[in-house]
Amino acid sequence: MKSLVVGLGFGQLYVNILKRMGHEVITVDINPNADADFTELTTAITAHAPFDTAHICVPNHLHYKTALKLAEHTKIVFVEKPGVETINHWRLLTNLNKSTRFMMTKNNQWRNNIKQIAENCEASDMIQINWVNKNRIPGPGTWFTDKSKAFGGVSRDLLPHLMSIMMSVNKNSYQDFKVRQYHTEQRWNLSDCTGTDYGVVNENGVYNVDDSATMELTDGNKIYILYANWKTNLHDDMAIHFYKDGESHLASIPLGLCPEEAYEEMIKDSLIHLEDDMFWNNQLEQDLYIQEKINDKSTDIIH
């Protein structure tokens, strides 16, 4: 197997996983200090294509352009969340490249405790999935907090992960869940970011994105409350909380950072299903669902 990783910030995780899986790994990063094989994508394609998998880990505004460039040279293109910018971009990408498989990375669906999570969801009528951090704004002042490059903040960074979990435990019925409330908010400014647990602060950069997001979905019977927050200054709460009758707390399951084994299983499973149209149609439906919901109120940011 031969795999390409574009962007060695978060992409380094994929490099480690793919090498452990026995893949030949080619790396691209425009930063000459990143220790990548290439600093330019076209040269890497010319030298090493075709690829079995490609993993796009560049700033969000470059996802679509990069995926288009890789499409004719790659069997499966994994695009880091939040995927591409709009539903139309997803549809164009797939319609223009019928022989290539595309997927927004949904690694949390391959956690080894998904069955346990699903069983607790079945016993509950209200489920709250939290990804709340004490102080984990990614690189304040870098592209992560610049709406022109990231399309949004925590609603594009963490909310897709929470939606992915919700969809995984409702595989046959997630489309029945409609958004009842969706609220995004920018609580902090760059001057508030004197430090972060993830990356470094660029004091001369831009900070104009949401850093707190809440989405409430229901099918009329169950309610899912998805809450993502980069910075509360209080405590971390990366967990799923289960309730019955709206109040009685049944259980909590901690999430923590997604284990590398889940990424590996996602890649393996996708390769196994390479020729399975039903699998990939389902992936596209999920990606469109996420894209539609997170874009519903993309301008609803309260300062």
Image: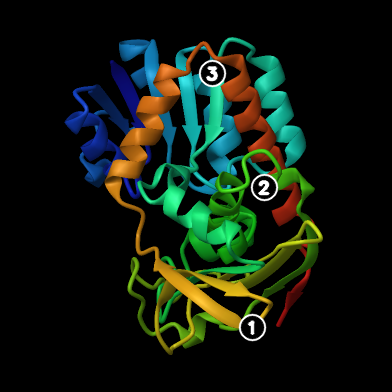
Q: Quadrant of the C terminus?
A: bottom right
**What residue does disc 3 label?**
71
Residues at discs 1 and 2 in contact (Cβ within 8 Å)? no
Q: Earlier in the sequence, mark 1 or mark 2?
A: 1
Tag of residue 247? 1
Q: CA distance from mark 1 to mark 2?
A: 28 Å
Q: Is residue 271 left or right of residue 16?
A: right
How far apart in space, not on screen, are marks 2 and 3 (Cα)? 22 Å
Q: Residue 218, image x and y in percent?
A: 76, 61
Residue 207, position in %: x, y? 56, 72
Kindly identify the residue that appears in the image at 51 percent across and 61 percent down: 120
Q: Depth check: 226 or 83 in front?
A: 226
Up the image or down, 140 lies above or below 51; here it is below
The spot of residue 60 in percent (x, y) is: 55, 47
**Hey, which quadrant is residue 84 in on the image?**
top right
Q: Position of residue 29 (x, y in %)?
A: 34, 38
Q: Amino acid at mark 3?
A: Ala
Q: Which residue corresponds to the image point at 77% horizontal and 34% vertical from the top-left?
A: 88
Kindly state the secondary structure of the residue where label 1 is placed: loop
In the rendered image, the vertical position of residue 42 relative to residue 239, given as above or below: above
Q: How many marks?
A: 3
| Residue 40 visible in the shown view | no
Q: Amino acid at mark 2?
A: Ile
